[in-house]
Image (cartoon, rainbow, N blue to C red):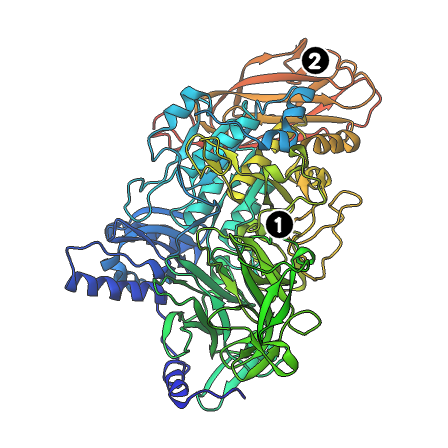
Amino acid sequence: MTRYPYFVISLLGCLFLPTHQSLAALSSHLKQLQTDYALHMRQTPNTAFTAPQSGAHLINHQFVSIDISVKAQHQVAPLIEQLQQYGVSRINHYKKQISAIISINKLYLLEQFPEISWVSSNKALVHAVGSPGGLSFNAADPAMFTDVVRKRYNVDGKGISIGVLSDSYNCLQTAIDDVLSGDLPDDVKVVKEYPFCEDPISPGTDEGRAMMQLIHDIAPGAKLLFHTATVSATDFAAGIIALADHGADIIVDDVGYLTMPIFQEGPIAQAVNEVHGRGVAYFSSAGNDARLSYENDYYPGHNLISRDSAHDFGQAAGKNTDFFQQITIPPNQLNRITLQWDDPAEVSGGKGAETDLDFFILDSSKTRIVASSQDNNIGHNPVEFTGVFHNSNATTFYLYISHRAGPPPSKIKHIIFGSPAPWSEIGFDEIVELDFIIENDAPTLIFPNGEPVEEGKAVIIIDVDFDEIKGPVVREINNDSLPILVGLGGKPVVQWFDRTLEVGPGTAHPVYYVPVGFDFALGPNGVEIFRDRDGLIPTSINNYQTYSGTIFGHPNASGAIAVGAIPYDETPWFGKPITQSKIEYFSSAGGAQILFDNDGNRIDQPSIRYKPEIIAPDASDTTFFGVDTDNNLLPNFSGTSASAPHAAALAALLKQAFPQLSPDDISQAMTKGSIDLFDPAQIEEETPTNDACADNTNFDWATGCGLVQADLVFEFIEDNTEQLYMTLKTSNPQIKAGDIFDYQFKVLNLSNKTLSRPRIRALELPSYIKFVDIEGCLGIDSQEVSCRLSDISPGESRDMNIKVQTLSNPTGVWRFRADLLTDTQIDLSNTQVMLETKLLINSGDINFDGCVD
């Protein structure tokens, strides 16, 4: 057993004793927020209240955005009415989840509602790198070859609607400039804007508008819609449905909520799957968290002195008992951490967790708790979450996981949301190994050619097993802390605590050279050397690393296409051989498994999600958002926030050319139309074979099926498409009683035969539709309600519109079915289509008859 000084054991024993709190509606973070706010108002009422470590979404220093879990669906509507009476505002809901804005000093009121099971708050994380900052050129266009397919197939996204979910669209009030410069169309539909544009804590940055600029560059004919995603998780889920209701064919987002379930699909993921089932292709940014994750089987440990049950990191790794995992948290930077385990989540619709775990972040001496998360999880969500912010010189901290109640879990996983180390810019096999000469009983470092080392740094790797540090570490030598000495036999050594380490060629501790202007870190394969970035201190997990994936939540949904990022200038079009192309160092890896269904039942076989599906370029120019990294006086938009809209824009071109494609068809085309990339991290891990990738392409958890290429995507569809398709959509996805609107048909002939006398025929014509006009027909049969089209040659298409007026419809849902007939001998089994359209009620029209009652 690892031994600690007695005063440390006493401290841990006091703080980590299991407690059995009574069930309460508010999360521990919101309870602490109430306490901190009340204390602030008593002591410094004239200053602005902030709480950066809480992780809560604060608004205007006195309000908080919350998500409420309601016990039963039928309780949602009555509860909303009651909340409104208490002054709760901005209320939205999705299934049994309610989102709202409430004054911090009124949070306690929520504990009186028996129908409320849980209340929490979590600030959204957008997956951009850099901050908001001309006409811009989108370098991702040639990098993906979308410029080629626009010309070759005569497509620009026309007729396709793309919904964007991000923070805001026009909080900066400069959208008109983008319209005038041609960087945006003049008909962007804002379904819901971020409502707190000028909030001093969480203002809108218009990242959503920057995403739209990237889309418009590639698919300039597409219709663009926007809905904010950063109010709350519930509002995000409702926004996904709202965009689909407003006619979005494709939706893309760049937002993550860090308390969404890892091992189960939460409400946002369920909303993604819902619109996927309605025919909407959904793209999501994979995230910018690299592999800053630890995942392992839970190893129960019990310290007899502290009397606390906890996860034994050491035993779980096959080493000596150790309850502490060392992590690096840089100063003046908010890092957020989520811990989850394999229990069902209440927020997903299940029964909730059976186990209660807490976690603590301690300082380097392990005597002071810097941050913690101590929710009572039983019956709620298997999630603990906290933020860590400090301005000290310390960077070394320890993570401790305590088992408070319930049965021990089988699996645990934590993710740190910080700034990972950049890729090593010098390959491990290319790092220069230094030698020594001994002169006057003093060692001097020399290069292999015999030249003395006069600048730069010298580092060694040491495998240690101390109470404070365990595992390999990389340390600089030849300095005041670790000077090089002459040991026995006249050989160079360094003194590491009570150990004398021989260093240099042929020893267990070779010395590696770090050039001037570069910094170093320890990676999975040894020393990593990267360019010094203004004293960057990477966030890292320093021992018991598992280098696990960080894609979770709705990007890991079955209905989503998760998109990783690669700098545009790392692609073959810009001269980089694909065998050398590196994805962004921060691009999140996949591998998280789904263990529970939506009802909270453990599934027999874990569901493996092959994420990310694809990689797309980032770092393109915008007119206002990002940081200028290529010195052309325009900001570059980097992150998976930029790669996802590029992929969505490519999908719009594909959908226009081949309107029959389902979301799964689009996903398959993109994975089959990608070229292989290698994982620069070179993690040794088991990666299952993914048949969705192209032949001779190796799927891995970092790069998916590879870099998506538009020309290959289109070629795959051409080579594998069915012969004949008919599509049907409505000109207005939400119809008011009495409106006149169009049903729009397109017949696409991809066979090698001419379709003779093709005829579209309505099936089960609703009685609540009155025909007004038909366009695009050679002949009309009013008895059968059918339209005769002119012959369609191979590769051609025909369009036809039926203009109708709505009459009485008590169901509120319109269903329209049609099929295609032709004299040509060809398989028509796939040509029957059905459209469902929601009906909105005019003011005063209670019975849907188009009249005010």
Kind of residue at disc 2: Leu
Residue toward you, 98 or 76: 98
SS category of the residue bearing label 2: loop
SS category of the residue bearing label 1: loop
- Residue 1 lies, with reference to residue 85, above or below; the image says below
**Mark-to-mark CA distance, 1 and 2:** 39 Å
| First along the sequence among labels 1 and 2 | 1
**In the displayed structure image, the side of residue 795 where residue 421 appears, left or right:** left
Tell me which residue sits at (43%, 38%) in the image.
207
Report the disc number at residue 789. Answer: 2
Mark 1 = which residue?
A: 558
Tell me which residue sits at (65%, 46%) in the image.
613
Residue 837 position within the rendered picture, expressed as x and y whole percent measured from the top left: 53, 32
* Quadrant housing the N terminus: bottom right
- Residue 753 lies, with reference to residue 377, above or below; the image says above
- Residue 805 lies, with reference to residue 417, above or below; the image says above
**In the displayed structure image, the side of residue 692 where residue 568 appears, left or right:** left
Kind of residue at disc 1: Ser
Residue toward you, 766 or 471: 471
Residue 9 position within the rendered picture, expressed as x and y whole percent measured from the top left: 41, 87
Tell me which residue sits at (38%, 24%) in the image.
177
Residue toward you, 113 or 725: 725
Residue toward you, 350 or 404: 404
Q: Nearer the viewer, mark 1 or mark 2?
A: 1
Residue 159 position within the rendered picture, expressed as x and y whole percent measured from the top left: 57, 23
